[in-house]
Image: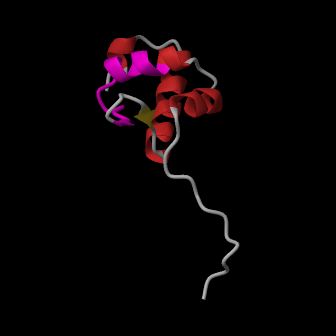
Amino acid sequence: MPPLNKPVEKRFFTITEVAAEVGENASVLRYWEKEFRQLTPRTNARGKRFYTRKDIELIERIHALVRSHIDRTYYRL
């Protein structure tokens, strides 16, 4: 039987949490959602975004590409 005091792994993260983790503003993440069609966080009925760990990994890759100053036509997803 697994221990009962095992910490619960968080499955969804808010835009504020993700922005702080990757070092960008929330407005930049919203912009990237428009520019990179693979970035599609879940939203609730009120439009609040919820990101998964997979979404965060994609955001980190986008962040690295954008900061590398390579022409966007080469890395358009």
Instruction: Name the side, left or right, on which 45 lies relative to 30.
Output: left
Q: Does residue 70 lie above or below 16 as drawn?
A: above
Q: Does residue 12 lie above or below 66 as drawn?
A: below
Percent coordinates x, y for residue 16 in the rendering? 57, 28
Q: Residue placed farthest to the right in the image?
A: 5
User: Which residue: 56% across, 32% down?
Assistant: 18
35 and 16: which is toward the camera: 16
Percent coordinates x, y for residue 66 in the rendering? 49, 17
- The quadrant of the picture occupied by the C terminus is top left
Task: Tell me which corner region of the image, top left, top right, bottom left or bottom right, holds residue 34.
Answer: top left
User: Which residue: 49% across, 16% down?
Assistant: 28
User: Which residue: 49% across, 14% down?
Assistant: 27
How many numbered marks are there? 0
Q: Does residue 35 lie above or below 6 as drawn?
A: above
The answer to whether residue 30 is magenta is yes
Percent coordinates x, y for residue 51 in the rendering? 45, 39
Instruction: Name the side, left or right, on which 74 lies relative to 19.
Output: left
- The quadrant of the picture occupied by the N terminus is bottom right
Instruction: Name the side, left or right, on which 29 lies relative to 1.
Output: left
The answer to whether residue 24 is magenta is no
Magenta stretch, residue numbers: 29-44
31 and 13: which is toward the camera: 13
Task: Tell me which corner region of the image, top left, top right, bottom left or bottom right, holds residue 73.
Answer: top left
